[in-house]
Amino acid sequence: MDRRRFLRNLFAGAVAGTAAMRGFPALAGDPARFAAGLREYPWLAGWRSVASETLGPATVPVQGRLPAGFAGTLYRNGPAWTERNGFRYEHWFDGDGMVHGWRFNGDGTLTHHARMVATPKFVREQAAGRFLFPAAGTTVPETQPVRNNDDANAANTSVMVLDGRLFALCEAGSAFELDPDRLETIGPVTWRQDLAAMPFSAHPLVDADGSVWNFGSIGLMGGTGLLVWHLGADGHLREAQVLDAPGHGYLHAFAMTARHLVFVLIPFRFDEHGGAFFERMRFTPDQPSRIAVVSKDAPGQARWFEAPFAAIYHFGDAFERNGTIVVRAVRHADIDSARSPMHGAMNGDGRPRAGSGARLAELHLDLRDGRARWEDTGIAGIEFPLFDPRSPGDRGARLYAPATDGDEATPYFNAVAAFDPARGRRQLHRYGTGILAEEHVFVPRPGRGGVDAGWLVGTLLDADRQRSGIAVFDARHVDAGPLAQAWLPYTVPLGFHGRFAAA
Ligand SMILES: [Fe+2]
């Protein structure tokens, strides 16, 4: 790879962004306004800043009946530290990451504990008592210059478990390795010396052989193109390739089939006025999305497709049939809301509001004639779709996702559902008024039993009783309600993504 050109692209964007922030007036949220909103709308506890480096441990009874032999830990990550010194981040993606361990002890109890990821940013800001470094979506006054991606890395988006090791992930810098038992930070991971501090996104995908594919977005830093990562199941780097792209494109995640990786680049431009990345970034729906289809045999080369614009964060499954790749993704109709999800909640505004118009769509990529088109599935009001990785690669998988069911007092998910889009079937469990539902991870049942034999494990915020909790479902009977639930004596901030590590 041409490392010098890669770095030039990367840091041209980073340095320009930092310079533009200097002297720019602070527009950020007001902690007092958030506190006032929280008094009126208790569900805003999901966006309240933590003020200590650890939460728990708390050991609580598991109510209901856990499946026999069900033991392990759901690790989750999310932005948690959002206020310092009278300054509050405005954008949900800004807060420093806190990693949670929800451990099913195997004896009818669950233990929760959580710890801030000790990134260089977090450690320096703890010592200073104020935010010092640029954030993704809020202009921070008087920031210090960043030397590389990891100086501003909030490690706040997801986790990866690989070869018994635990990592906190964020899209604009290195993975940070953590101790899987104590959640203490070991440090940023350099997969290969010349790739130190390169972006390693928060949505790696695990292949059938246990190896891991991921990308790093150069577009996030102002350049163009992708870095494609391939790690072995042993946690060692197999390959890293630079994929050139024909223009700017934002992507948060990607999809894959047995043979291909699919990267959907969302077109955007930068607003001429300064500010943080998401303040300056404007999606451009008048431009097409460019889609790279990359053979796993040659990850430095792509075949490019064009399809109508779509604002996407998350993909479901992808499959290949009759020379066509079909990719499932959640499209957001309201692109301003997509640029700053839950912006009202971050700023203490709990009034009812319309969602982002999220709908599950299928992207059809015809490998014979090079055409691409979107098809709506009719499924709306979902995010964070997941599926059984054992699903066959020639037809659509059953998808599992938090969902919005009926009228709700909060603009967040209140249910979990299983969808079979091809057959138009849905199973849903509505949690009840005042309960916010997060991502529900699919946990395969060991041994035989077939595809979709397994469990869903998802976290909850019960706003009325000010407690966070976790629920376990039989994935084939979501509408039967949780098999088991456990509730903590406190709330934790809502996060984004998790992985379950079986004991
Ligand atoms: Fe994500």
Image: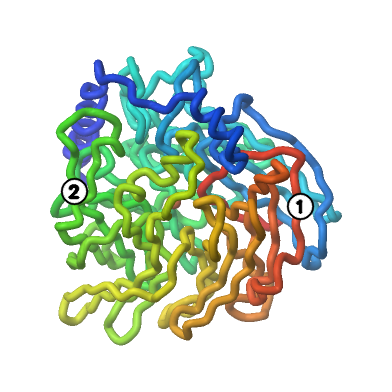
Which label was assigned to residue 248? 2
Q: CA distance from mark 2 to mark 1?
A: 45 Å
Q: Is residue 289 left or right of residue 116?
A: left
Kind of residue indicated by mark 1: Ala
Q: Nearer the viewer, residue 273 or 53?
A: 273
Q: Which residue, given by chain and number where applicable, does mark 1 sit on?
A: 486
Q: Nearer the viewer, residue 160 or 128?
A: 128
Residue under the point 35% across and 35% down: 137
Can you name the residue that lies furthest to the top here? 128
Residue under the point 58% across and 34% down: 38
Q: Which quadrant of the figure has residue 414?
A: bottom right
Report crowding for label 2: few under 14, some 14 to 19, many 20 or more residues within 10 A (C-alpha).
Answer: some
> Residue 426: image x %, image y %?
54, 77
Q: Earlier in the sequence, mark 2 or mark 1?
A: 2
Kind of residue indicated by mark 2: His
Q: Nearer the viewer, residue 220 or 185?
A: 220
In the image, residue 26 above or below residue 181: above
Q: Is residue 181 left or right of residue 93?
A: right
In the image, residue 2 above or below residue 325: above
Q: Is residue 192 left or right of residue 61?
A: left
Determine the secondary structure under disc 1. Answer: strand
Which is more foreground, mark 2 or mark 1? Answer: 1
Report the coloring of the rendering. rainbow
